[in-house]
Amino acid sequence: MDLSFLIIQSLSGLASASSLFITACGLTLVFGVTRIVNFAHGSLYMIGAYTAATLLPRLLELSYGPVSFWTGILITALIVGAIGVLIEVLLLRRIYGAPELFQLLATFGVVLVVQDLVVQVFGPQDILGPRAPGLRAPVEILGRRFPSYELALIAAGPIVLGFVWLLLRKTRFGILVRAATQDRDMVASLGVNQALLFTGTLFLGAFLAGLGGALQTPRVSANTGMDLSIIAECFVVTVVGGMGSVPGAFLAALIIGQLQAFGILIFPKSTLVVVFLLMAFVLAVRPYGFFGRPEIVGGTHAVGIVSRTPRASGTVAALIVLALLACLPLVSDAYLLKVATEILIFALFAFSLQLLIGVGGLVSFGHAAFFGLGAYGAALGVKWLDAPMEAALPLGILFAAAGAALIGAFVVRLSGIYLAMMTLAAAQILYAVAFQWVDVTGGDNGIVGVWPSTWASPRNAYYILTLILCATAVFILKRAIDAPFGYALRAARDSEPRAEAIGLNVRRHRWLAFMLSGAAAGLAGGIYAFSRGSVDPSLLGISTSVDALAMLLLGGIQTIAGPLVGAGVLHTLRDQIMPLTGLWRLFLGVSIIAMVLLFPRGLVGTIRHWREERA
Amino acid sequence: MSTPLLDVRNLTAAYGRAQVLFGLSLQLHPGEVVALVGRNGAGKTTTLKAVLGLVPATAARIAFKEHSLLGLPTYRIARLGLGYVPEDRRIFTDLTVEENLEVGRRSGRVGLSPWTPERLFQLFPNLAEMRGRRGNQMSGGEQQMLSIARTLMGNPAAILLDEPSEGIAPVIVQMMGEAIRTMKAQGVAVLLSEQNWAFAAGISDRACVIERGEIRFEGPMAQLLANETLRAETLGV
């Protein structure tokens, strides 16, 4: 390993850092002013990449040259900026005052909608953009060849930083943006129209996302997975740099770029692991990142289950439902039983998330991590240890609980949005590990041959086993919610300082909640693995996390039964609708947005609200 | 008397279920200084915030320059020429003195020489020495001056001034008094919410005594100065 090699590695790290910074900078600016973590930022980046990859070849056909190329990049960024304005006016403007969980879910709804629309508009295949005229030939650096486009990218980062710095320091718009970042009400009291300021900020943020995406097209094909992979990286950059801080994002992107460039030498399979270690280290030392400030977060209120008195009628109803479910194998066919088994599994999965969100106020966006760990733990036990189902299932639970203990130890130091972003990032990293560590996990193909023991193999036997395990787990979780432990979590959810002032160790309670919830989700994942006979990385993916969140939202976040009902309804809908249309994500995304805007109490919450209104 | 610049009739406001204001009425005329005095928790700050639309409130009428303010967003109210200086000052601590003033800048009334940073630095000489300093490196008194100066940059016809003397050194309180007199001389009306009785008494033309969300007394300051029983009962002075 000689000097020239190190320099080339370092340069390519700088190029990655530049593009990452340009995109992350938009995210952090939008967060600073609107206090909304815009999940759709990654979608804007993806739209930028697709638009540029489609637009640039046409422009270059008209007139080949650098002017056409860079004009095309600029036009792309402007188009994406306009889409950002559309999102602000139609959606964000309506949810500035909403609890952060709803804000996150609504912008995630946009992600789902854009995923399907992009396929409709640009087609399912990846599109590689043209190479930049004038920058096609590599340059020679210390005897090694280096792409000259990468050098242009290295320059682009600091240019954007300088431009944003000038905009923020030297223009009235920038000064107002910085003032609004700190105190929106005071800015309004001084006669500034915030709506315009917010729309302008969204334009700028989306413009930068579009620019970041457009600049990638000569290096990476535009593909349908790039929205979620960039948003996870952007989350890491903004969290490490400090939410809302542009210089922080720049510094974080630089460090991460270098770590990725050199981390590949240490962990050739997964550079994300190095990034995660950095993030863990920075957050352990500085919980709000390099330049972040605690008072920026935690402005909005947590939503969750409300006070209630357990009633005998509730227990009776639960027992009746349980008895009916136990009778189901007598009347239904194999397919229905399979669907019912999955519903039970998702009900437990969603219920375990309810412990974190509804009871603890801990908005976890990476709950798939624990579901997937449980599934992989069980499958790895079968594959590598020849463990029978009876041993593999507990192994899955152990995996998930250990993962929750590790992830939880870091994230319980955080609150609100930081926690949501970190849990999502952690799940994405596990996803990457499962995807890239082919020797152990089977990579994209996953692990097959994960079948239950002979006695549990028939559909109806496995269904009954699932029912017993899930009902027991839900019962245990519910006992925990109604125990002093659950009350302590709710106290901490409603006011952390007050909970600490009466002597509760908030972090410890939250950490235990993570482990309990993770273990339950792991059980659900393990049962799921054996019901399908295989596992694959998608179990750890964001869409699995969002399934659980959507079930919670649909059923009602403020109720105990909400996630159970939500799981039943959503999974049934999916089973019925998905085969009919290729636009399931569009449907789900629009539904999530509509729920947040029109129907935030969910099914169970709304029914209870009606009953209470009448009483 | 002329038509009031600010006319508040039958104002009620509540935080959740806790009602704070119970049908309060008051008027502010052009160029006068009115002291809104009362004990801690009587509803002084809430009154000012309700006028600006910063807390939900109902009223028979809130009008400024004959424009109804009911239901208007805060920034529209401010643009009509109603300035607000909150009691906690709310300086933008990441911004320099000059940038703070820039946020407040708004072209104002016709025919009067507008406030500029230079004129404000004459009014508050301390600020002139720290134009490039950030808000988080300023003392409480300096922040208070900056907060008033920032609001004046909007060239308001009236200012709602919440507890300008709270927690600052006596010498700066004196400067505040001077500043309020200068504003008055410029034709700016001031509604001053104040706990510091001596300070309020010294610079106000009229007084409104507020008690448990209602106006107990309204009249010339001289009349309140003469009525010791009322003062002892409502203000404890």
Image (tube, helix red, strand yellow):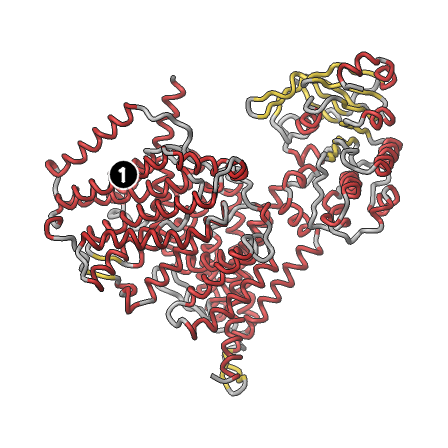
Q: Which residue is farthest front?
A: A503
Identify the secondary structure beneath mark 1: helix
Comparing B78 with B133, the one in front is: B133
Residue B190 drawn at (x, y percent): 80, 29
Compared with A2, A360 (above or below) is: above
Q: Quadrant of residue A467?
A: top left
Would you call the spot at circle 1 few (<14 residues within 10 Å), some (14-19), or many (20 or more)? many
Compared with A381, A368 (above or below) is: above
Comparing A312 with B158, the one in front is: A312
Q: Quadrant of residue A129?
A: bottom left
Residue A45 drawn at (x, y percent): 48, 58
Residue ID for mark 1: A568
Residue A536 drawn at (x, y percent): 27, 59
Q: Quadrant of the C terminus of chain A?
A: top left
The answer, for residue B153, to whether it is visible in the render is no
Residue at horizontal 44 percent and vertical 43 percent from the top: A362
**Image-based side of A545 in relation to B179, left or right:** left
Compared with A197, A484 (above or below) is: above
- How many numbered dots are placed on residues in this image? 1
